[in-house]
Image (tube, rainbow, N blue to C red):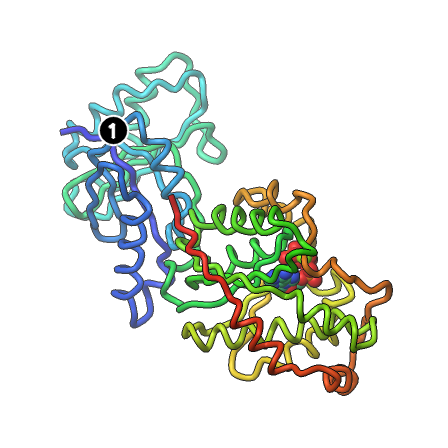
Amino acid sequence: MRKRVLLLRFGELFLKGKNIKVFENALINNIKKQLEGEKFDFHVTLGRYIVSNYDIEVENRLIEKLGQVFGLFSLSPATEVFSYREEIEEVVNEINLEGMSYKVSVKRADKKFPISSMEYAKILGTIIWNNNLNPVVDLYNPQIEINIDIRNNGRAYIYTQTIPCQGGLPLGTAGQALLLLSGGIDSPVAGYLMAKRGLELHALHFHSYPYTSELAKEKVLTLAKELTPYVGNIKLHCVSFTKVQEAIHVNCVPEYMITIMRRIMMRVAEKICEENALGAIVTGESLGQVASQTMQSMTVTGSVVKTLPVFRPCIAMDKEEIMAVAKRIGTYDTSILPYEDCCTVFLPKNPVIRPAIEKAEREESFLNIDELVNECLAGEEVIEINRD
Ligand code: ATP
Ligand code: MG
């Protein structure tokens, strides 16, 4: 028997807890969902998942899709054989090094296999040595590593390539949260990073139509869509912020405009969390990046959220690092499109860098906060963004 398969590895870490079954079932479900529409078989063996019986022409597409599933750590395209010496050696016999230095590694999970790993690696290494012209063995830094993984399921897997996946925890195993999604670079990255820890996402976007254009909203829809291969389907809550901004503009001092806007955003976010049973708020803030992202600013904006944690996964990241993630996951090019954000409308010249809660509260006393929040919620539009 000889079969082309994909060998999937998941994190060993999360398998130590009490909730092994919950994690495993979620991961398996997520893998199957990710490959929906493809023809394949799926098997679970001790410590590995095997995808087989697919069309070899679509292998790269399957690898790309599996590479987006949180909870998978790496995968290898492999040749599966029965774990008999003749079968393994028949495959190894055909290996052409094409001038590359090599090393053979044997892993023997199945101790019934008659030879030790070390010994068998030597035997296979010799076969390859004899079959190739001017072979070079390099045990420390080989150009090609030939792995033979002898598993407990009566099969052996022979592979040379290990492709890293996302890592993280299976989507959904940490609950659900609300991502504050602007059109910028940071918030999509924040959503990706939290989903990687197992959170499913709703998203909330504030627009200032007609001050901001339809295109600005389209941009956010595109960003949400670009996240779906990783984070799954997203419910996007779109809320008009125009009235709030006008009210602040008319009634409050300009330096506190952004602080108060942020506090109202947080209040709206907390209400939407309540209505949808979401357990946290996620933002793309990064310490010191702009005036509204100092410690004091975050204290003053965060203090209106009473019942939930606010997660800021980009808090310790440099802009360069955030941009690198955005490029890798494919949101960067959309994020840098030049449409205005609601926060740039009415932007004050000198926003306060170290706001005080008392001062923010005083400025807010000139507004009817509850009414503004309720109006935001009343005009809420919910758009389902589904993964293709
Ligand atoms: P981003 O790149 O995510 O827009 P930023 O560096 O531009 O972030 P700010 O504009 O200060 O930073 O926004 C900080 C965070 O507040 C954002 O990361 C996002 O989570 C949230 N936010 C800002 N504007 C909006 C908006 N219009 N709708 C929803 N959330 C927003
Ligand atoms: Mg922004």
Residue with the mark numbered 1 = 55
Camera-side residue: 85 or 326?
A: 326
| Mark 1: C-beta under 8 Å from nearest atom of ligand 1 | no
Q: Is residue 315 visible?
A: no
- Left or right side of 319 for 33: left
Image position, residue 120 (x, y; %):
26, 35
The quadrant the C terminus occupies is: top left
Image position, residue 4 (x, y; %):
24, 30
Image position, residue 199 (x, y; %):
43, 64
Q: Residue at x 33, y 48 (%)?
A: 9
Residue occupying the far top of the picture: 133
Q: Residue at x 22, y 38 (%)?
A: 40
Q: Amino acid at mark 1?
A: Asp
Q: Quadrant of residue 328?
A: top right
Q: Is residue 173 above or below residue 77?
A: below
Camera-side residue: 385 or 250?
A: 250
Image position, residue 383 (x, y; %):
45, 57
Q: Is residue 330 above or below residue 342?
A: above
Q: Is residue 123 above or below residue 207?
A: above
Give neighbour class at mark 1: few <14, some 14-19, many 20+ (Cα, 10 Å): few
Secondary element at tag 1: loop
